[in-house]
Image (tube, rainbow, N blue to C red):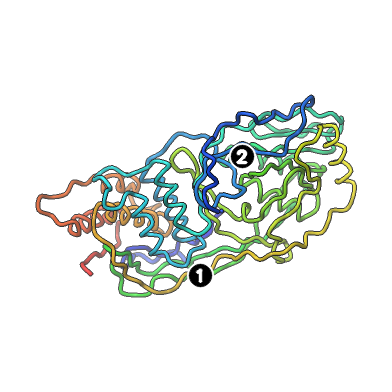
Amino acid sequence: MALHRPLALFVVACACAAPPAATPPDGSLDASTEGFPDGGPEDAIVAASPTVRAAGSCDGLAGYGEHAAGSPALDWSRVHGNVRFFGLHRDPFAVDVALVGALGGEGAQRGEVRGDAAGFEAYATDGPETCFVGSWPAASPPPSAIDPSVQWAAPGVPFALADAAEHVIVDLRSAPEGPALEAFLSSIVREAVAGEVLLEVEARVFDGMRDEAWAPFFVGREGVYRSTVGRRPLAFRGTGRSVGLGFLVGDRLAPAAARLVLALRTAGPARILGQPVPTRVAETLTVPAAEGGFAFRALRLRDAEGELLPDVVPADVPFDTMAPMDLEARFLASVGAPAAPLDGAANRGGPLGLPAETRFLDTDRHEGTRQAALIATHAAATLFFPYWDVVTSDRDARLEDALALPADEGESEAEYGFRSLRFFSNALEDSHGITWFA
């Protein structure tokens, strides 16, 4: 989901060509699925999800899909860029200071970027509605249907709508967030939804950026941000048969799944089975980091008419434990009756535009601030520098090289940091990067 229009430049004085017009940690550190029922037809269906390692505002959030650890510096750039520009905070410079601390602060080792889960957990506990979750293994296979008109589906098993299916139950209790889940959800929409279903997304947007100031190394001369809060449609377009859909939800849900569940439930053709869906989960975006995922709330969701969704959408068939035969029967009865109106309280806050001002923070200059300055610069340039498709520089390799740049003998921490930023700015061809002492 694109939340910005890359029209201007961050930490660059000018471009010489015209640019184109989640609660405290829950204490659960066991990421295994031991004791989680497989939900087969001979077993009771339990409306619960696996436990997950979590830190920050993680209520209701699923784990992230298992993936190979990437570059710590690039993980931090992706996380920090998203949180800094699109998170719910009102002070991007305070977010920069949180990054310094998460990288180890004064204790950061030269040339070694901290990339373990503990660093991302520390960063998550410093911001509003941010969370680090560990990984979940692939989802359990779906149960077998008892009623011949019902087809079960779960992530990890390719989905194609059976000819005889009139109803589909999608088991999301152990579905981890990530690209595999998104691909699976796309197949559900493609096969089992006819036409277009809309939500309205409220998010912070940027019409480009002006010169940036980032303490302690970059000092700008103008106001920084020209951000607003905008609305745009979030569309789910299907080309398949229209069938009755039931989403089996546990006490944790992947944000991508939550958005689809709420879109289809709001539009009418779907029912929620098991646990209620906190709308905040659907308003959360997640990116991979370390061996898990970093989540941050950035959105506020409205229905197609622009009405704010309730804070919690209750289950149409609520239960903790139920026999499969009973669940299918209650689901079919629910689909056959009119959907209950969604009229609960909607008191959660939403994104706000950032202040258009520069603020200088009294931050010590050391290896932690040097690393944070380079990572923040790379993150913003990745999002907003409009010329990456025409320059020859590899910004990711340039960041790694800048972080590994050795200090010169007798060089102060400030001089070392400035030289590192100048080294990275050479990747921004045909532009100007400016540093000076404050």
User: What label does residue 245 carry, if any?
Assistant: none
Q: Quadrant of the C terminus?
A: bottom left
The picture places residue 321, in percent across and down from the top left corner, at 77, 37
The relative height of residue 437 versus residue 234 in the rendered view (above or below) is below
Residue at x 82% of width, y 43% of height: 244
Is residue 157 rendered to the left or right of residue 383? right
The picture places residue 313, in percent across and down from the top left corner, at 73, 54
Type of the residue with mark 2: Leu
Circle 2 residue: 181
Residue 382 position by quadrant: bottom left
Distance of label 1 from label 2 (alpha carbons)? 31 Å
Give neighbour class at mark 2: few <14, some 14-19, many 20+ (Cα, 10 Å): many
Residue at x 56% of width, y 53% of height: 22
Type of the residue with mark 1: Gly
Q: Secondary structure at mark 1?
A: loop
The picture places residue 109, in percent across and down from the top left corner, at 25, 45
Q: Earlier in the sequence, mark 1 or mark 2?
A: 2
Is residue 192 rendered to the left or right of residue 402? right
Q: Secondary structure at mark 2?
A: helix
The relative height of residue 290 versus residue 386 in the rendered view (above or below) is above
Which residue in the rendered view is the most extreme toward the left?
410
Nearest the eye: 154 or 391: 154
Circle 1 residue: 353
| Residues marked 1 and 2 touching at CB (< 8 Å) | no
Residue at x 54% of width, y 35% of height: 31
Nearest the eye: 197 or 74: 74
Residue at x 64% of width, y 36% of height: 174
